[in-house]
Amino acid sequence: MNRGRAPLGTRILRDGHDWEAMTHEQVIAARDRANRAAASRAGRIVTGFADRRARIATVPIELTGRRLPLRVHRPKRFAPDLPLVVSFHGGGFIGGTAVQNDWLNSRLAAGLPAVVVAVEYRLAPVHPLPLPVDDGSETLTAIVADAAGWGIDPGAVAVVGESAGGMIAALVALRARAEGPPLRAQVLNYPATDWTETWADYASVAEHADNPTLPLPRLRAARKLSLPPALDPHTVSPLKFADLAGLPPALIVTAALDPVADHGRRYAERLREAGVEARLSCYPRATHAFLSTPGLVPAARTARREILDFLRGRLH
């Protein structure tokens, strides 16, 4: 594991909050402020500007007992029956917004090309696990069921997620294996894959505990607030599933300076042991969430190209 320091630019992202001491109301207020900042023009200097070759629209979707906003990215050059990519943002299940992934998602839409749908799934502490996973799985199913209405090819579908969204994408893929729809690929960017009592038993967690983009107190708070006492954490920890056979090919992107780097590495190993094609790419000098901070971490551009190439090879 790389023991280097985080790039200087990323150190401005340390928020200074004592997440473990915050009330639920304070957590919600802090995430709302952070989301507004990420969506602002000044925030785009860090999170990146959308690709002008794509158009973005916010579209509601009706699910059982709730309505969710979706951030839909389409190439400006019309083409029928495009592949579908369903995307899940990061934020430890307690924060984040689909807007923070505009830089990547718009480039996937224009470059593949594809319809890229970013899900504004419900967040803890009000909506803990497994509700965010339910949102992702039901959204995927609903869009594929209305493939003609969405202008997508129901036989060319992938999921993409970062951090907590990477865990959601992996769990959605596991559900789809049993219930459909079939997936052709999954891209898991620096995913958390173990939310059980062994979540911290990885060398990377201790080695990068003070990382500015995911310090250990924030990671502990995310697990505490997103995991209700009655829920068995094994059911939301892809790494702990006994059977991983039959899953779609995976690209797992990790950052060398990330506390959950070993979560992704070990999941790639488990997938390979189960006979699943799994590519693991670890980016040196990269921090957690680096694909959401392309203005600060140059490796984001290289990773973006790798993700595009991987998805092109499996969706077209």
Image (cartoon, rainbow, N blue to C red):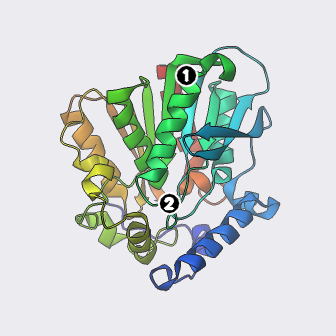
- Label 1 CA crowd tier, 10 Å (few <14, some 14–19, many 20+): few
Quadrant of the drawing holding the C terminus: top right
Q: Quadrant of residue 172?
A: top left
- What is the x, y in percent for residue 160? 50, 39
Q: Residue at x 53, y 76 (%)?
A: 24
Q: Quadrant of residue 251?
A: top left
Q: Is residue 182 above or below residue 57?
A: above
Q: Is residue 60 above or below residue 293?
A: above
State how far apart marks 2 and 1 are (Cα): 26 Å
Residue at the front extreme of this rendering: 65
Q: Is residue 69 above or below residue 247?
A: below
**Left or right: 223, with 296 as reference point:** left
Q: Residue at x 64, y 45 (%)?
A: 67
Please tell me which residue lies in front, 67 or 187.
67
Reading the image, the residue beneath label 2 is 127
- What is the x, y in percent for residue 299? 55, 50
Please tell me which residue lies in front, 239 or 25.
25
Q: Quadrant of residue 143?
A: top right
Tag 2 secondary structure: loop
Figure label count:
2
Instruction: For residue 316, say whether it is visible.
Output: no
Identify the disc placed on residue 118: none
- What is the x, y in percent for residue 285? 48, 59
Which of the marked residues, 2 or 1, is nearer the chain's N terminus? Answer: 2
Q: Residue at x 57, y 82 (%)?
A: 16
Q: Amino acid at mark 2?
A: His
- What is the x, y in percent for residue 276? 27, 29
**Left or right: 183, with 27 as reference point:** left
Q: Amino acid at mark 1?
A: Ala
Reading the image, the residue beneath label 1 is 145
Q: Residue at x 78, y 61 (%)?
A: 40
